[in-house]
Every structure is written in structure tokens, then in C-alpha cells.
Image (spheres, rainbow, N blue to C red):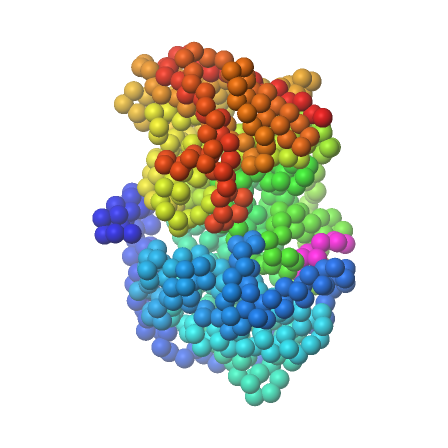
Amino acid sequence: MNATARMAWMVNRLRCMSVAEVGYRMQQAAASQAARILARRPPPPPLPRTRTFGLGGAPQLAQADIDALLADAERILVGHVVLFAGRSFDVGPIPDWNRDPETGVLGPAVFAGDITITDRNQVGDIKHVWELNRHLHLVRLAQAAAVTGQARWLRALGQQLRSWFEQCPPQIGPNWTSSLELGIRLINWALVWQLVGGERGALFDGEDGARLRADWLDSIHAHCSHIARHLSRHSSANNHLIGELAGLYVAASIWPCWRASARWLEQARRELEHEAQAQFTRDGVNREQAFAYHVFASEFLFVAGLVGQACGTPFSRAYWAVLQRALRFVRSVRDVAGNLPQVGDADDGIVFCLDAFGADRATQLLALGASVFGGQASEHPGVRWLLHALPGPRPAIDHHEPEDAWAFPEGGYFVFGADFGSAREIKGLLDCGPLGYLGIAAHGHADALSLVLSVAGEPCLIDCGTYSYWQEQKWRDYFRGTSAHNTVRIDGLDQSVAGGRFMWLKKARANIERMPSSPHEFDFRGSHDGYLRLPDPVRHLRSVRFDAGSSTLVVRDEFAARKPHRAEIFWHFAPGLDVRLDSSALHVRGKAFAMQVHVAGAGLALELVRGAENPPLGWASRNYESREPCDVFKITALSSAVPIECRFTITLF
């Protein structure tokens, strides 16, 4: 980021801040400078009161799960680590922990407050650095030791931990630049601690083991101190704050070794109770309006809650009710094949990885909920491992949420379709919610009144995903912009106005004007004010009707303005579908369905776009840092009064 761009970003960021936040940021800057001095001081000696739950060994597992786990561990042993849900990187048996595995750039061993994490010349892609240093893969080595009892896994684990403490002393290097990353690392260290037997484990045998234990506790103290001083507040108090508090709570529970531990524990517990209520709507939707972060925040809340249960200090019924409602939302919007729409930002971030790298996190979350709330013995290997490492009684709950629902008006989503849960399922999701959470709405996309559709468990109309946070700016702008969603763009402008990669300055507000009464006979009407900012204001109104009897979806778009405007409607189809446009209609064919799309309106230009780069259009991203072409049906009109109607007729084979 050059000086001009940096100045523009700072001005935009200030525009999103309250007076109280500006004061807090100034306080944080002072605290950062104080940390430079505090980092030189030795930590207080820990008291001998760490907590180990003491089950030891491993849970009962299928042989196939054991084989897969050990194969992962063998790859880690020679330096091959999976990051971002499936990409393998060769980081070496003893990694350079401050080196970006993607670009090879080695971050500087300087005070963390002096590092600019957006400077690729200085740190490479900081997401890759942070992902490796979450230490998800160290948990795999601890699992291998628990399964086999072989000392070689503990030796490898000890070597990696020692190298981390040597290369990443407190406040030095890029791995001390984000409190969230410290929180995730603490959670994974807690899992490692439990799986290797804690104080009584062979990892700490002998003089070397005692030194490892001492260095580890010193680093844990530094982590907790840093998080407590640098919590994400005000417009940044999103999933980051939940993750920081969860890490602090877990660490203060497992290692209550210092005078400050009780204070950290109480603060983290009190604020987690509050944030669980604040960051999820009463109908169960995470307020960031990003489904991946819905799962991410839920994972944090579950881990903290399970630690509370294991330690005999349970969270409230209201806390657990938030998670029940959050799980109901996930169940309701997933299709019959388990696909979760890619609404909002996603970076493949996970809190812990106890099953296969790249496994479906939503499936694990639902399995965890079934076990915790329903008392079911889970067959999911990741759930078995988590409940083995963090054993405790089932939480007290007031009631069981219904298995599924279709209307989430506070969160801003409505499900429509037919034959839910069957092989002939048609399931759509309409988005009429806020852009995102708090002042910057960091992870929201400009997708007001967009919709997605799945047929027979196969994604059809899709949200294009995220691709990357730190690639060339045009890609960040495209994937979170209006043209990457199944909605309308006016005059080539996004519905909301961006001020940075994680910042929106003007936010479109959606409004429900006609509430649907059923998912099967669905009749919705809504609008948004995103284009009222134009010199000639434009109001976009969208009606969505679905008739289960005829398997027909009708979407009608209207525009209220004084003058003609260029309106573009985008329909994005999943990669792998056969999509063809002729003079009569758009024809779509999947594995178990066919669809015809007829368009009515005046002066329309119809085209099929795929994989265009300048400007980007026709791309989908299923995983972070990956993208592939997809077909986009683009409808363009120059009009201010004539509605455009798209009729989708679905035929199941």
C-alpha cells in the first residue's frame, strides 16, 4: 500500500469510528509502546496449578480414521503441512515460523508493533504466516502420540514447540501482531496439553522436558497478557473479539498459574456471555452476515463452553441457547447434500482441526451440537476427539430448538423450496439482511436482495465466494461486490461503497415490504436504499415468488427513478453445470435436473459471460486462494420504469 493509498485508508477508517473508538485507538497505541518495554521483563514465576483432565489415550475410532490421522502426522513429520482447507506447503520438519510459506518472505524479528502486516515485501501474505502459526498441525502430532503411544511423535512435537519459543519470543515478529491469532494458538496449545497428558505427560520428562514446560508457560503468560491489553473493540468487535476472549478464557482455565489469571478468567467469561448475545440475532444468525464466520464464531463459543463444563464452571443457559439457535440456522440453510451457501466473506479459517484437514466444518459443528445438546454418541471423529480432550457434563439447557426453520427475519434470510431433506429437494435462500456488523461491516458483501438455489443437492445459482483478502485489489473488490451476486447493479456501481479491504463507508439497507408466509408458496417483496445516494436516486424493488406445485421461481425487478439508468442483473451458475443461451431461453442442466430461464422486459441485452478478467466477471471461489470460471447470465437494460422478470422453470429427472 503506497503512502497515498495508506492516507486514504486512514481517513476512511476514521470516518467509521466514534469519538470513543478514536480514544480507544490512541490508548492502544500507547499500550503498544508500553509493551515494547514490558517484553524485556521476565514473566512472573508460575504456580504449580495447571489443569489436566487426565483421561489420556485416544477415543474409540474407526481404523480408517486412525489410518488417515497417522498419514497426516507422517506428512507433518517431514514438513508437509496443510493450510486453508486443502493446500499443502513444504515448511520443513522445523519450520521458519516467521516465513510466509506462499511467497517465501521471512518476516522481520523486530517489535511486532513496528510491522506493517499489509506490506507484502515485509511479511509476504500475512494470512499464510498466521495460518501455520495457529498450530493446528501440532494437535495432529499430539493425536498420533495418543493413538500409538510412540515417543517419536512427542519428540517431533517438542522440537516444533522449542523452535517456536526460540524464533517467536514475546512481542517479536509477525506472530505477535494479531490478538485473534494468539487466541487460536492458545486453544490449540490447550488441546495439545490435554492430549499429551499435561503435567504428567512424557513430553515433560527429564531436564529438557522441564525446560520446555517452563518456556511454554512463559509464552502462555505473554499470550494472555497481550490479549488482555489488546482486545478488539468498537467497530472491530466482531469474531475477533469472540476468538480473543475464548483463547484467554481457555488459557486462564487450563493454566491458572499467575495472579492475573483469575482476573483474565472473569473478564473473558463475562464478555463471552455478552458477545454471544450481541453477535447473534435472536433467530440464530451471526450478525457479520458471513456464513463461514457464523461457523467460526460458533466453534469458539463451543470450545470455551466445553472448557467451562470440564472445569465445573458452566456458562449460562442463555449462552448455550445462542449456540442452539446458531446450529438451527446452519441446519436450515444447508441443502440435502450438506452444501452451505457461501454468503459473505470466508477464509477457510478454523479454530481447531481434530479430523481430516479440509473437512466440512459445518458438518462437524452440527455433529458437535447433536452430541452436546442431544446426548448422542457421535460417530464424527473430530467431535469424538474434542469431547475426549475436554470432557465434562452436558450443559443445562431450557429447551430444544426445532430441528429446522425457514424464516429468519431479524437475521435477514428466508428459505424457499420444496421436498426439503429428500433427494428431490429444491432449496433457495433469499438475502434481505444488513450488509454486515458494526461500523465497518468488515466481512459483509454488497449482496442485498440476492438469492441462491440448490436442486437435488447440487448448487445451481451460487454466491461466488471470497477468493482472497490480499490478492490484487480488483479481485477483492469483485468477489465482495454486487456483480458477483445474484442481484441488480445500477450504473456499474456496487450497492454499498467500500472504503478498504475490510471496510464499507455507505451501507445499503434492505427492507422487507411483503413477508412470505410459507417456503413452498413463497411470495416476497423487498427493496434497498443502496442507490438512493445517486444524483438521480434509484430505488430497487425485487419480488420473489416460488410455487412448489410447478417448481417455478419468478423474480421481478423494478426500478423507481426520474431518469433512465443502466441496470444489470446477474445470475451466477455453479461450475460444472451445462449452461447454454439461445434465442428462446437460457438452458441449464445438472446431474439430476434441467432448468429453463425466460426473461421478459423492454430493450434487454442478454449475454453469457465466463472467466472475464478485465473487469472480472464469471468467477467462483470454493476455497480461499482458489478460483475457477463459472457461467454468468447477464441481463442489461437502460430503463427507469419497465420491470424485468426472470422465470426459472425446474425439471427434476
Q: Is residue 175 magenta?
A: no
Residue 156 seen anywhere in this rendered image of the structure: yes
Tell me: 197 left or right of 437: right
Q: Residue at x 48, y 81 (%)?
A: 45
Q: How many marks?
A: 0
Q: Residue at x 65, y 47 (%)?
A: 363
Give the magenta range: 377-386
Residue 529 seen anywhere in this rendered image of the structure: no
Tell me: 441 left or right of 152: left
What secondary structure do most residues of the magenta stretch adopt? helix
**549 shown above or below 254:** above
Quarter placement of the C terminus:
top right
Tell me: 389 left or right of 179: right
Instruction: State the residue lying farthest toward the left.
Output: 4
Residue 275, percent from left and from top = 50, 49
Taking depth in this image into account, of 406 and 94 the one nearest to the observer is 94
Taking depth in this image into account, of 172 and 5 the one nearest to the observer is 5
Taking depth in this image into account, of 644 and 614 the one nearest to the observer is 614
Q: Residue at x 37, y 74 (%)?
A: 39
**398 shown above or below 605:** below
Residue 582, percent from left and from top = 53, 19
Q: Is residue 383 magenta?
A: yes
Residue 379, percent from left and from top = 75, 54
**526 shown above or below 340:** above
Residue 303, percent from left and from top = 60, 57
Q: Residue at x 55, y 65 (%)?
A: 80
Instruction: State the residue lying farthest toward the bottom.
Output: 207
**429 shown above or below 59:** above
